[in-house]
Image: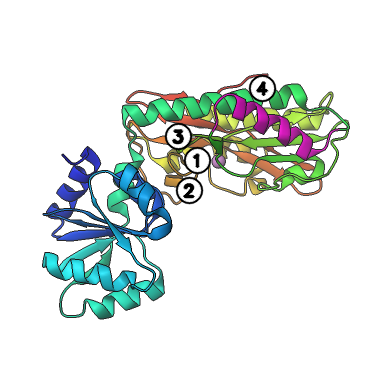
Amino acid sequence: MENSRLVALKKELREKGFDGYLVSRDVNIFYLTGFSGASGLFVPVDGENTLYVYGVNYEQAKDEAKNCEVVLVKRDEKLEEKISKRVKASKARKLGFDELSAAFYMKLRRLLRGQARLKQKSELVWELRKVKSSHELKLMRKAAEITSKGMQVAYETIKPGLTEIEVAAEIEYAMRKKGAWGTAFETIVASGVRSAYPHGGCSEKRIRKGDIIVVDIGATYRHYKSDMTRTFIAGKPSKKQQKILEITEKAQEQAFRRVKEGVRAKTLDGAARKVIEKAGYGEYFVHGLGHGVGLEVHEPPTLNPQSKEILKAGNVVTIEPGIYIPGFGGFRVEDTVLVHKEKGERITNFDF
Ligand code: CO
């Protein structure tokens, strides 16, 4: 029995006139087979799926991969030749794929000339991955819960004199103790003027009294990610700091309130952007409102002014407006939000 994801993919392929699909993005292969570390997956509309694995991961693949035949790619063999033979045997004429390097695509196209055409169709897998199952949501809630714990520890730890790295160490240790498999991305603890870099990372810089500190963290739990940001002030905030922080929070809330099935991603972005623009800080909101989260920390649907996405129940997205003033500091408030039919639900949560 194939899993429902493969059944759904094959149904889509059939409806769109494809005879098969080639998967090469590792996370997509994991999504379809439960195994991470293969070099390719061939999914014919009819017949058995084939997973291609080099020796280093072969034994693990045989133990873990589901719904496919695991084929060893020996060191003296060429992956593109193995795949093209399998495709020819399947008699597939039209093949979709998620992504291939330019070099690999050229080689495969040459080998399949006169046999099968290749067409990129990455959205076929993304459409499936965007809507989370109840099992996936269970894991995502756990990742979010661990992340929220990390944020609480950030709040309790931050004080003048500590370096950004020391704060990051406490956060990551707390998340590990709560069961994190790892961090979803490199922890950001960006203080002082560095907080104005949206991707500031963390450094040896010591936190000083009055610093703004942007903490952007995420835990991974059983392959699923989470993403959350809070902005703290070391000590009592100045009037200007307090004001901009409140604008950022209000922008996040205005977007969050509008979350439900059927809403346009750009409508949410616009709701947050309007708050920031009205307050006179529009030019400092230098990124989109958010992004999907799941097996990857940045995945579709994307929430920005150009987005054509319409949200569906089961989407999990971030809502993270920010205001970044060079030389002064940056502010961002972010939660991972689950889309329901009638509302949104913050699955990361921490108030201070
Ligand atoms: Co994010």
The span shown in magenta is: 162-180
Q: Is residue 228 above or below residue 351?
A: below
Crowding at mark 4 (Cα within 10 Å: few <14, some 14-19, many 20+): some
Q: Name the residue under label 2.
A: 305
The picture quadrant for ligand 1 comes to: top right
Crowding at mark 3 (Cα within 10 Å: few <14, some 14-19, many 20+): some
Report the amino acid beneath label 2: Pro
Front one among 209 and 134: 134
Q: Mark 1 points at which residue?
A: 270
Q: Residue at x 27, y 73 (%)?
A: 81
- Distance Cα–Cα, label 3 vs label 4: 22 Å
- Distance Cα–Cα, label 4 vs label 2: 32 Å
Magenta stretch encompasses residue 238: no
Which marked residue is nearer to the observer: mark 4 or mark 2? 4
Q: Where is residue 323 in the image (x, y as percent from the top left)?
A: 67, 41
Which marked residue is nearer to the observer: mark 2 or mark 3? 3
- Tell me: is circle 2 under 8 Å from ligand 1: no
Q: Which mark is residue 181?
A: none
For the C terminus, the image quarter is top right
Instruction: Determine the image quadrant of residue 234.
Output: top right
- Tell me: is circle 1 under 8 Å from ligand 1: no
**Residue 41 in view (yes/no):** yes
Q: In this view, does 115 lie above or below 31?
A: below
Is disc 4 in contact with disc 2, using a CB cutoff of under 8 Å? no
Is disc 1 in contact with disc 2, using a CB cutoff of under 8 Å? yes
Secondary element at image label 4: helix
In primary-sequence order, the first of circles 1 and 3 is 3
Secondary element at image label 2: loop
Report the amino acid beneath label 3: Arg
Relative side of 95 to 196, left or right: left
Magenta stretch encompasses residue 172: yes
